[in-house]
Image: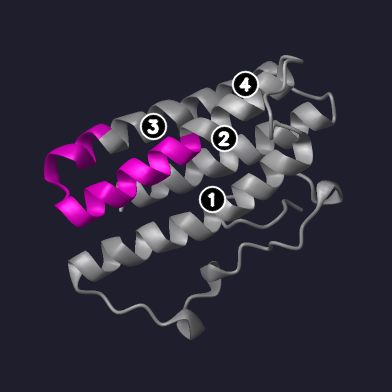
Amino acid sequence: MATNAAYRRYRVAIMNFLWYSHQGAVTDQEREALEQARHAHHAAFAEAQMIATRPVLAQLDAVTQALSEAYHRTMCLHEGNPVPDGSFDEIREYLTWLWERWEEMRGVMRADLGVDLDPDLDPDLDPDQGAGPGAGPRTEGGGAED
């Protein structure tokens, strides 16, 4: 559970930082929130590497690589040196794709635990993909903050 939460929190923190950067409103608080989420993700991943089954670890590795790419693109854009495919809209689209990738990872983790997943009973499956630049920062649940 800690690994799932850490991966999700890190993705949300990248999304928030990207948004604040796009608005020219990055503060020390936003930088710190991103770094805390990043470090929590690294710690959760390191712990999971010691206990996860091979199928789960393969998913964790793939999503970790994607999160690293999202972080890299976001920081390059923020610093004024965007990489190819590193515009605000391209990164936002990548993070939306990453949500879908995270759902796949979570499905493998749940299957590994023997837990059935019924999307009709899980309100958290809607990543609010229609949220655009005017939506503002995200919360842990994936929706815009009030």
Give me the C-alpha separation between circle 4 and circle 3: 14 Å
Magenta stretch, main secondary structure class: helix
The residue labelled by disc 1 is 98
Q: Quadrant of residue 143?
A: bottom right
Name the residue located 81 percent from the left edge and 53 percent from the top edge: 132
**Residue 95 belongs to magenta span:** no
Query: In the rendered view, would you say 66 is above or below 113?
Result: above
Name the residue located 20 percent from the left edge and 65 percent from the top edge: 112
Is there a contact, CB below 8 Å, between mark 3 and mark 2? Answer: no
Q: Secondary structure at mark 3?
A: helix
Q: Earlier in the sequence, mark 2 or mark 4?
A: 4
Give me the C-alpha separation between circle 2 and circle 4: 15 Å
Expressed as whole percent of the image width and height from the top left, the position of residue 61 reads: 32, 41
**Three-letter amino acid code at disc 1?**
Leu
The residue labelled by disc 3 is 40
Q: Secondary structure at mark 2?
A: helix
Q: Earlier in the sequence, mark 4 or mark 3?
A: 4
Give me the C-alpha separation between circle 1 and circle 3: 18 Å
Give me the C-alpha separation between circle 4 and circle 1: 21 Å
**Three-letter amino acid code at disc 3?**
Ala
Magenta range is 46-67
Q: Earlier in the sequence, mark 4 or mark 1?
A: 4
Q: Earlier in the sequence, mark 2 or mark 1?
A: 2
The residue labelled by disc 2 is 70
**Three-letter amino acid code at disc 2?**
Ala
Q: Which mark is residue 31?
A: 4
